[in-house]
Amino acid sequence: MNSGRAALSKLAYLGTAVDSVANAPYWEQQFGALDGADIGFGALSATQNVYELINQNLGNETYALFQLDLPDSQTGAGINAGSHTYPSYRYYHDQYSALYAWRSIGQSYYHAMEVTLRQRFRGGFQGDLNYTFSKSIDWTSQAERLSTSGGNNNAQIINSWVPGQLRGVSDFDMTHQINANWVWDLPVGHGRHWLANQGRVVNGILGNWELTGIARWTSGLPYAVDNGSRWPTNWDIEGFATQSRPIPSAALKRGKGQQMFSDPAAVYASFRQAYPGESGNRNPLRGMVITPGTRAWTNLSSFTNTRNSNSAGRFSSLLLPMFR
């Protein structure tokens, strides 16, 4: 049925005249009562009447099917009525429009390479440098603990007959991740290069300091292009736009100010509305290293231990953290 709707939708997007639309056995069988009927478009075949309804609701083909499937007492459309009635509720349920449930059919894949460099240098400095190159692929990225509402994280299956249409990089996928941590015992205080012979007070204030830090940088997160206020496949969930051609690499460069792309029109032109039966492309774009999709921060801390004068072996500590 989706393939039949998609075929008529493609003709409508091309601006095909209704008298050029050939009869399709599927529509003639399902809505044969509309053959020769005038439901507002003149006397047309069943297929041509369905085509005109789809053409009126292009991008919202589920609403065209709603008008066709429900009795006239529910739609008031004058379609399934009078001398051209036929069985109702063959596509839509008569009690609800959407029913969500969990199923253990999801698929996910994760591959990664991790590299760690750990070094202790002279002068009390030591640190770790870690790099991860990875790729995570799944159908959806929503945790089971979250609600199953259609508005959560765009993580519901759009076409329940072909759930694999949503296969794409995970919402949380980060191709590159780099983090580093270090500790530096500053050479100041008793037993160190500077102020090694100072008294207890000076050493308690200026000596025994450590400088520590953590830094992290990741590449941008993936994201999708919404299908807009269109429901071609699922009555309750819009789905994603479909990428129809490669995006020019020059258009993907950073734009000025808050603009994500240097040529947003070229990026937009690379996508189209999803056809009936399609879910669209999930996460085809990715945030760049200088966009809000990037995660980069640094934490620096200064730490000192000072031995208490009245209790051997006990220390007082002072921590001065700084974040960026």
Image (spheres, rainbow, N blue to C red):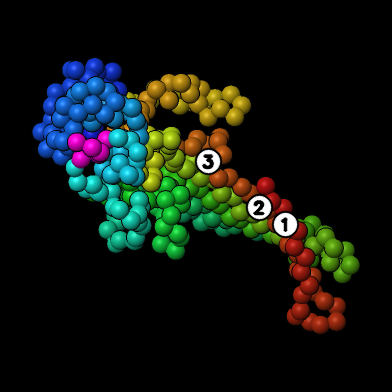
Which numbered tag is attached to residue 47? none
Residue 83: percent from left, percent from top = 19, 36
> What residue does disc 3 label?
293
Dots 1, 2 in contact, CB < 8 A: yes
Picture quadrant where residue 312 is located:
bottom right
Give the amino acid at mark 2: Asn
Q: Position of residue 265 (x, y in %)?
A: 46, 21
Quadrant of the frame with the N terminus: top left
The magenta segment: 79-85
Residue 84 counted in the magenta span: yes
Q: Is residue 221 left or right of residue 181?
A: left
Query: In this picture, is 320 found above or below 158?
Result: below
Crowding around mark 1 (Cα neighbors within 10 Å: few <14, some 14 to 19, many 20+) is: few
Q: Residue at x 87, y 69 (%)?
A: 200
Q: Give how far apart the Cα atoms at labels 1 and 3 are.
A: 26 Å
Q: Is residue 56 magenta?
A: no
Element at badge 3? Answer: loop
Residue type marked 1: Pro
Which residue reaches farthest bottom?
311
* Disc ID at residue 299: 2
